[in-house]
Amino acid sequence: MEILGFPIFAVAFVLLVIYLFFAGVKTVPQGYNLTVERFGRYTKTLQPGFHLIVPFFDKIGAKMNMKEQVLDIPSQEVITKDNAMVTANGVVFFQVIDAARATYEVNDLVLAILNLTMTNLRTVMGSMDLDQLLSLRDQINAKLLDVVDDATQPWGIKVTRIEIKDIEPPRDIVEAMAKQMKAERIKRANILEAEGDRASEILRAEGEKQSVILEAEGRHEAAYRDAEGREREAEAEAKATEVVSTAISNGDPQAINYFIAQKYIETLGQFANSRNEKLVFMPLEASGVIGALGGMTEMLKNIGGKSDEKSKHLP
């Protein structure tokens, strides 16, 4: 028999070669690996690119995703070390690094990773107090990563990150924590206010102290100046008295007039400033005052002259 002028055996042979060619050609896309089995036994792994296998003897066992994958951990209840019930969930990032081991070492890879992570999540979080769970998430993530990564190494898996997304304490614990936080903030505010009042009192006391010191220094300086003024006034008066005494001893009548007039005027001033009732007879005109002073001077002269005569008649 012939087909289109060619023997049927030749046509069948050509078709068989074409079929075997396409059956043996395998193209692996980027980011994936293919496992090859011969008579049901793993033989090799095909990397991304063009490959040829033996038809009828070799077949593709599994197509494995080699890119980093994300797996959500569903919410689950966890009892903490201090017997608080919390609800937690998270996310796992993993990558297949050995396609053969990921295919033949574990039956359901995703389910195995999920259950392993959930179990260790309860174990790690159950060994910590509630306050530690809420404040030490980085430590929880690190512990989970170490445990799960070590457990999945025989499967050809590399766990890159494990993150806890939400930790939800019971509603009554949340309310108690809110009250505690409010009380702590009020306490801090009262402490800050008390410290501010204390600092204000200290500054006020320092200001009063400085004011008293300055006032005392001012009084001391004023007393010193006053004493110095009185001392100079006394020195001036003593000097004037000495000059007048010298003049009197020398027989100068003008010095006697000056001295008597000064005392006369001071005495009149004291009478005028006195609050008691007084009656003073004195000349009203300045010439009268000078005349009185002149009379007093003449009287002193006469007294002085008589004293001299008496001294002459004495043997």
Image (cartoon, rainbow, N blue to C red):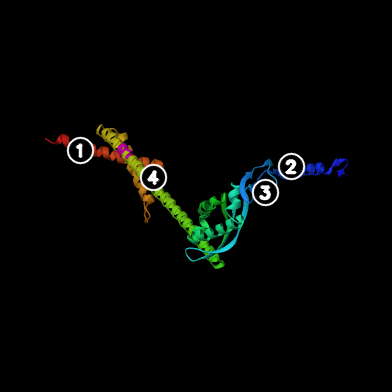
Q: Secondary structure at mark 1?
A: helix
Measure the C-alpha gap from mark 1 to mark 4.
56 Å
N-term mark: 2 or 1: 2
Disc 3, SS: strand
Q: Kindly report which numbered mark, 4 or 3, lies closer to the viewer in this rendering.
A: 3
Give the residue drawn at x 57%, y 67%: 171
How busy is the neighbourhood of tag 2: few (under 14 within 10 Å), some, or many (20 plus)?
some
Bounds of the magenta segment: 232-237
Quadrant location, the N terminus: top right
Q: Residue furthest front?
A: 1
The image shows residue 150 at horizontal and vertical percentages of: 51, 51
Identified at 74% across, 43% down, the residue is 22
Q: Which one is in front in this view, the residue at disc 1 or the one at disc 4?
A: 4
Mark yes or no: residue 214 visible.
yes
Query: Could you say whether the residue bearing mark 4 is in a helix, strand or loop?
Result: helix
Main secondary structure found in the magenta portion: helix
Would residue 261 be seen by someone viewing this image from the given angle? Answer: no
Residue 307 disc label: 1
Q: Is residue 145 left or right of residue 307?
A: right
- Lateral position of residue 70 relative to residue 278, left or right: right
Pointer 2: what residue?
Answer: 21
